Amino acid sequence: MLPFTRAVVPKYFSGFFCHSSQLYSTCKTCDDPKQSYQLLIIGGGSAGMALSAYFSRKLGPGRVGVVESSQMHSFQPLWTLVGGGLNRLDKASKPMGHLFHNNCTWIPDHLKTFVPEKNYIITQTEKEIKYDYLVVAMGITPRLDMVKGLMQALETPGVCSIYYGEGSVKTYESAKRLQKGNALFTFPSTPIKCAGAPQKIMYLTEELFRNTGRRDQYHVQYNNALGVMFSVPVYAKTMVKVAERKGIHVNYFHDLVEVDWKNRIAKFRVKSSNEDVEKIKDFPYDFLHVAPPFSAPDNLRMCTELVDSAGYLNVDPYTLQHKKYPNIFGIGDCANLPTSKTLAAITTQGKVLRRRIGALINNQDVNKQILYNGYTSCPLITSHNTVVMAEFGYDGKLLETLPINQNKERHTLFYVATKLMPQIYWRLHVNGFWEGPSIFRRIFHPFQR
């Protein structure tokens, strides 16, 4: 029987002071057309990488497989800092094969289809891979096709997005070159990866304009398809004040539908607050940062047995177990969990899956108290040295970790978000040692439930 013990602080930090290459070297890959794994993970992003490392250590060689076609693994929150001129793009990525645990088998292929009733998947190269347990960790996909002209516009000067690695570099370079004019930032109507990112890059860019000494020559606008600045009211109030202080004009219920890149005009579908009236409004731009619409990946959405009506993996919000197939679990952005899609959410979801899948593999009863509480976090960068650290769970319940008011712009929180978190990610998270800050929350807030 394998020991799935509760993580403690020393275990968290056992990998912190050694480089990941000391723990893991290049993993095995497999080209066998027919394979079988005790645990198969679809996706080698932040969720899949951490889970594969943990279970590879526990289960041993050849029992964990990961289907992932990408050759590079990226710490995507760093792209915001790159877009703001606070970091370099090469710091955000590492070779995929150098990060997987030695015991893990990497299948460098695309998923073609799921066959959940027979417990196997088929890859793009027609590999048939069986599993006892399946974790779907596929993330979400930017949908440039949902905005007319956006794909072409991103190839033109001044149109950019930090939701792509190279796009973050273009964001900073475009902002530096802009001498004056209309700077327009957008937020879509769909679920989105890291819902705070469009505001973060807006505040960093606005500060760049301010530092030129010509702030009055820039007109900065935030066109938000939603009716609030942030999903949790207490943080939303703070963000409204930040935008007002910085002279940023916020337009609610403005959803980007087209970019006329030849005439440099962004077109928005504008709804009244009661959504009875709708019209298209034009906004000329000199600088346009787009947070694109997102959806679940096509190959997941096409498997109607696994997804809900919106195309997201249909799982129980507390157990993360599929509602129809009990040996399938979901984690991260691809799941239909009613919480913000962030890296922080993945860490706590991973903790739940480790306990639940571990018990099932060991033929043990699952502890029914091990449930996901919707925890997620967003470090809302408001300047080049301040952050508001939003931490909350289902229904907007505050789950702040530190014994300070995190709904205040602080230099200490900026350090946590920009210096400490990248170290935790590369040294602990991808190696399967990080389970989120809940252990520290219990120390600082012993009576919080």
Image: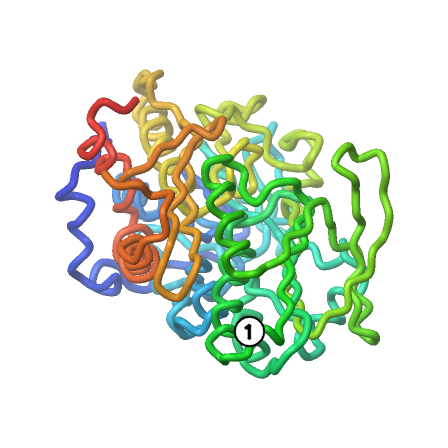
Is 261 situated above or below 146?
Answer: below
Kindly give the residue lying farthest to the left in the view shown. 10
Q: In which quarter of the image is the C terminus?
A: top left
Q: Count residues near mark 1 (Cα–Cα under 10 Å), then give few for <14, some for 14-19, many for 20+.
A: some
State the residue position of label 1.
215
Residue at point 42%, 39% (across, down): 376
Viewer can see residue 27: no
Residue at point 39%, 66% (across, down): 384
- Along the horizontal axis of the image, is 433 left or right of 134? left
Viewer can see residue 415: yes
Q: Which of 43 and 384 is in front in this view?
A: 384
Q: Which amino acid does label 1 sit on?
A: Arg
Q: In which quarter of the image is the N terminus?
A: top left
Residue at point 55%, 64% (across, down): 162
Residue 81, quarter of picture: bottom left
Q: Which of 277 and 416 is in front in this view?
A: 277
Residue 404, quarter of picture: top left
Q: Percent from the top left, x then y, of residue 419?
A: 29, 62
Q: Nearer the viewer, residue 348 or 192?
A: 192
Q: Say what secondary structure mark 1 lies in.
A: helix
Is 248 situated above or below 34?
Answer: below
Q: Nearer the viewer, residue 310 or 214?
A: 214
- Along the horizontal axis of the image, is 216 left or right of 88? right
Q: Percent from the top left, x then y, of residue 7?
A: 21, 36
